[in-house]
Image (cartoon, rainbow, N blue to C red):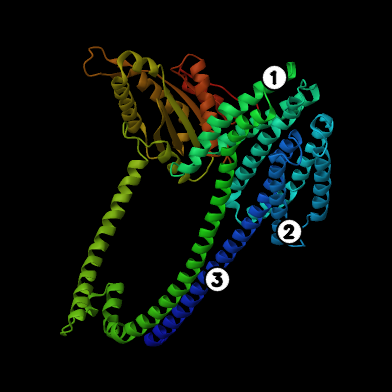
């Protein structure tokens, strides 16, 4: 087959590379553009959330001035002017929210404004009455209605919060913290609403108002328990950390305990010396750190989103510039390589092929004067020499691998096959009826280790291994099966005469005397044998191993130093076993299938 033209292949490859780079650059640019769009959308939704959140906060903040005005002297009281200012802020925040989310946003602004106007009218009606004519129940009712109006904006805030999280799931934790701090602030502001009207009237706190105050206290504590575990700030956030410490010290260290004690006393008897303004002067400033930390979190979220949006825009611009630069550079480098590098390299094609085919007769050294090509020729000669060295190392590596494989399948202590090598040897042997599997276990080997030490135990294992190696014939495989247990596999004639052979081996172990260095008396050994013989070619090695293990168990149970055979097929060999006449050999026949 004719080889394709190398120059044509180079041109085609260069064209493909340029096209691929254009595709990759376009993909990266599209990804950067999408990231910028996501950042823009996230920032937009976060700003809408901030507007809704501020509206919700403004509505809730209208409650405290309204309470103060209801406890004041009428429309001429300064508290009334503060209430009007709070109403103006609420109206402005609601209108700003409506403009931000548009008419398509699923929220009934008309109902909100109508309910707010109705509650404000009730408050104004009560304020115009003389203070001693204002009914406590009416005051509590209208304040609760005002609180409910603020809570109607919560679904809008929650819906916008979900939009923010969908746009950027990474800020879900910060969004939840802002909402938690807002809930904590609202609960803290609501707590005095249950007790201050009765304080102003010099009345005992009613049981229903006490229960409501206690529920609010429990909510505050629950929110703080939840929020304190999540408000883990970096050391660099000094302002936030300072506000967090102020919440712990000012509100939960001073304001909350102060109001708690006041509620407890007011539930028992009216306080004739303390006014509602005195309580507000002590309690309301302690809520300030909660409000400040909430606003700092919200501002930080918006600032981070703005920074992320700017960062995404610059990434998109940088991706565009770098993509253009890379494509232009690639085109220029391709043209330069074609003219200045590729053509001269074709002259060395034959030498490279010779190295690949390991044909030194086809190597022709370069005799020109171009320095770069001289260096390349020297490099090719070095490559050829190293290739020869690598071939030699490859042969050495294969020899070493064979050696390591041998070591991996041999027990270092006894020189026999280990369990892995044993089963590899079994897998290489064909299945047949004339096969025997024998397990040999040294009797009382643990006592040897306990009385004489593990070094003596190692001498014993080496001696047993030596006996097994000497006894193993060409049709036998011997291995250390694990611990003091050894395995033998016999095939052919040796398998048919396995019981006699094992009895001989048992006697050899019984006669074995193991000398231990440093000890005067030699150790005497005995061993127990479990034998299994293949019934037919269908018996697997694993089945034979299980049968041999059962036989070994029988030998141990019968008193050790015995040969026992137990499997389904040895029953027909009972006569042959009896002919041997060895007293240490017995036959245990399984009767089950």
Does residue 435 appear to the left or right of 338 in the view shown?
right
State the quadrant of the N terminus: bottom left
- The front one of 475 and 150 is 150
Which quadrant holds residue 272? Answer: top right
Closer to the N terminus: mark 1 or mark 3? 3
Would you place residue 530 above or below residue 159 in this image? above
Q: Gap in Å between the C-alphas at discs 2 and 3?
A: 34 Å
Report the residue at 83% width, 51% height from top.
114
The quarter of the picture where residue 348 lies is bottom left
Q: Residue at x 73, y 58 (%)?
A: 98
Q: Is residue 467 left or right of residue 301?
A: left
Disc 3 marks which residue?
A: 30
Image disc number at residue 98: 2
Distance Cα–Cα, label 2 vs label 1? 43 Å
Q: Which is nearer the N-term, disc 2 or disc 3?
A: 3
Residue shown at 55%/34% (left/top)? 247
Q: Foreground residue, 332 or 115?
A: 115
Identify the disc placed on residue 264. Answer: 1
Provide the secondary structure element on which disc 1 rests.
Answer: helix
Please state the horizontal and vertical placement of residue 42, each as a whole percent of the image: 61, 59
């Amino acid at each position: 087959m004719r080889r394709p033209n190398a120059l044509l292949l180079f041109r085609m490859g260069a064209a493909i590379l340029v096209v691929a780079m254009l595709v990759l650059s376009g993909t990266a640019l599209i990804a950067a553009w999408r990231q910028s769009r996501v950042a823009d959308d996230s920032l937009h939704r976060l700003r809408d959330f901030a507007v809704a959140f501020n509206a919700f906060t403004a509505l809730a903040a209208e409650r405290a001035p309204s309470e103060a005005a209801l406890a004041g002297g009428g429309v001429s009281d300064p508290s009334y002017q503060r209430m009007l200012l709070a109403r103006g802020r609420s109206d402005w925040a609601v209108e700003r929210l409506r403009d931000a989310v548009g008419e398509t946003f699923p929220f009934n602004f008309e109902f909100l404004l109508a309910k707010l106007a109705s509650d404000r009218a009730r408050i104004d009606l009560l304020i115009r009455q003389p203070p001693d004519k204002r009914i406590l129940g009416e005051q509590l009712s209208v304040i609760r209605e005002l609180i409910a109006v603020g809570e109607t904006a919560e679904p809008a805030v929650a819906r916008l919060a979900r939009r923010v999280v969908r746009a950027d799931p990474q800020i879900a934790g910060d969004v939840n913290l802002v909402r938690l701090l807002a809930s904590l602030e609202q609960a803290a502001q609501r707590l005095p609403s249950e007790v201050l009207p009765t304080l102003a009237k010099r009345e005992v706190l009613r049981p229903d108002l006490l229960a409501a105050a206690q529920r609010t206290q429990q909510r505050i504590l629950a929110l703080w328990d939840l929020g304190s575990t999540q408000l883990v700030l970096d050391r660099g956030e000094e302002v936030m950390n300072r506000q967090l410490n102020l919440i712990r010290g000012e509100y939960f260290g001073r304001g909350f305990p102060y109001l708690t004690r006041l509620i407890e006393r007011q539930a028992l008897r009216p306080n004739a010396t303390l006014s509602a303004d005195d309580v507000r002067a002590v309690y309301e400033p302690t809520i300030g750190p909660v409000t400040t930390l909430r606003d700092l979190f919200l501002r930080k979220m918006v600032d981070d989103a703005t920074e992320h949006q700017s960062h995404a825009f610059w990434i998109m611009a940088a991706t565009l510039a770098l993509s253009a630069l890379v494509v232009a550079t690639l085109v220029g480098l391709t043209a330069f390589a074609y003219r200045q590098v590729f053509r001269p390299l074709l002259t060395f094609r034959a030498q490279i092929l010779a190295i690949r085919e390991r044909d030194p007769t086809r190597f022709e050294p370069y005799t020109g004067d171009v320095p770069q090509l001289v260096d390349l020729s020297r490099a090719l000669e070095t490559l050829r020499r190293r290739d020869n060295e690598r071939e030699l190392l490859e042969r050495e590596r294969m020899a070493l691998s064979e050696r390591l494989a041998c070591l991996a399948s041999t027990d270092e202590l006894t020189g026999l096959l280990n369990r892995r090598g044993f089963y590899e040897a079994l897998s290489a042997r064909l299945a047949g009826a004339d096969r025997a599997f024998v397990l040999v276990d040294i009797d009382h080997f643990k006592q040897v280790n306990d009385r004489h030490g593990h070094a003596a135990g190692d001498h014993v294992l080496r001696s047993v291994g030596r006996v097994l190696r000497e006894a193993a014939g060409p049709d036998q495989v011997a291995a250390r099966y694990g611990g003091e247990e050894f395995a033998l596999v016999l095939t052919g004639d040796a398998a048919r005469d396995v019981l006699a052979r094992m009895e001989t081996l048992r006697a050899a172990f019984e006669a074995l005397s193991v000398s231990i260095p440093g000890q005067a008396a030699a150790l005497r050994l005995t061993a127990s044998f479990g034998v299994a013989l293949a019934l037919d070619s269908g018996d697997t090695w694993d089945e034979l191993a299980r049968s041999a293990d059962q036989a070994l168990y029988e030998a141990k149970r019968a008193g050790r130093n015995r040969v026992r055979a137990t499997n389904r097929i040895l029953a027909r060999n009972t006569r042959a076993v009896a002919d041997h006449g060895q007293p240490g050999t017995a036959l245990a026949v399984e009767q089950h299938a």
